[in-house]
Amino acid sequence: MPEIKKDNLPEHIAIIMDGNGRWAKQRGASRIFGHHNAVKAVRDAVEGCAELGIKYLTLYAFSTENWSRPKDEVDGLMSLLVSTIKSESTTLKKNNVRLLSIGNILSLPVSCQKELKEAMDITASCTGTNLVLALSYSSRWEIVEAVKRIADEVKEGKLEIDQIDQSIFSSYLTTSGITDPELIIRTSGEHRLSNFLLWQAAYSELYITPVLWPDFRKIHLNEAIASYQTRERRFGKTSEQLVSHS
């Protein structure tokens, strides 16, 4: 296991879980087979973050663009989502993990909304890691919705245009109250954000691994964190400026 410095952990890790379909194809199986076998990776990621004391773990579970996939795959994913949330909620509570969600939740099947709400209610009092599921989510959708809400508030006289700044805008996003991710992990070797947390990822450190998501384990999570801990996070400043202020 790579050495992890406990005094330099990211507060928020976000993961683009990619590669389920390719993992299944390599085994001559359907894509939904890959999704089913990805549940272990989710457990390992959540457990790993909980053990390290990571405050937020956001998982890109289903994008708004995923609705355009074949109906049998979408139906299978929704069924898997319901059964997994239902079976894991007690374990989450036992491990002091609080479940949250972001995205267009009302677009999900009623059964998914029901299980999601029940699981969030069950874990509402948990004070450990916050597991944020991005469901029917896309960053462009989120930003457009925020603009609409801000426009309505301006129209109704509840908000002045001159009041709008980055902080105000962030408060209208679905991630309001959640810190921006310091580390974004993408599995399967693809080098893109795929419409995920575009506003929030402005200064995130990116870690790309060739590991397909169903094969992702704690060792891979720790490797990503170890890589993050070697980075110099400058936020537009120079290295010299950082040294002078340290």
Image: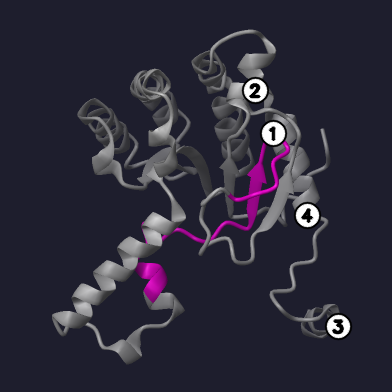
Q: Nearer the viewer, mark 1 or mark 3?
A: 1
Q: Which residue is mark 1?
A: 188
Amino acid tagged 4: Gln
Q: Is residue 246 left or right of residue 110?
A: right
Q: Is residue 176 magenta?
A: yes
**Mark 3, secondary structure of its residue:** helix
| Image mark for residue 50 | none
Instruction: Give the tally of numbered discs.
Output: 4
Identify the amino acid type marked 3.
Answer: Glu
- Residue placed under numbered mark 4 in the picture: 229
- Give residue 84's position: percent from left, percent from top: 40, 21
Horizontal side of 229 relative to 139 (left or right) equals right
Q: Residue at x 27, y 74 (%)?
A: 150
* Magenta-highlighted residues: 169-193
Q: Nearer the viewer, residue 18 or 129?
A: 18
Crowd around label 3: few <14 · some 14–19 · many ≥20 (10 Å)? few
Disc 3 from disc 2: Cα separation: 44 Å
Q: Residue 91 in the image: x percent, y percent?
A: 43, 24
Return the disc, 2 or 4, that comes first in the chain's sequence: 2
Quarter of the figure with the C terminus: bottom right
Badge 3 is on which residue? 240
Question: Badges 2 and 1: C-beta atoms under 8 Å apart?
Answer: yes
**Under tag 4, what secondary structure?**
loop
Label 4 with label 3: CB-CB less than 8 Å: no
SS class, disc 2:
helix
Q: What residue do we see at 69% from left, 30% from top?
A: 218
Side of 191 where 60 appears, left or right: left
Tell me which corner region of the image, top left, top right, bottom left or bottom right, holds residue 171: bottom left
| Residue 175 is inside the magenta segment | yes
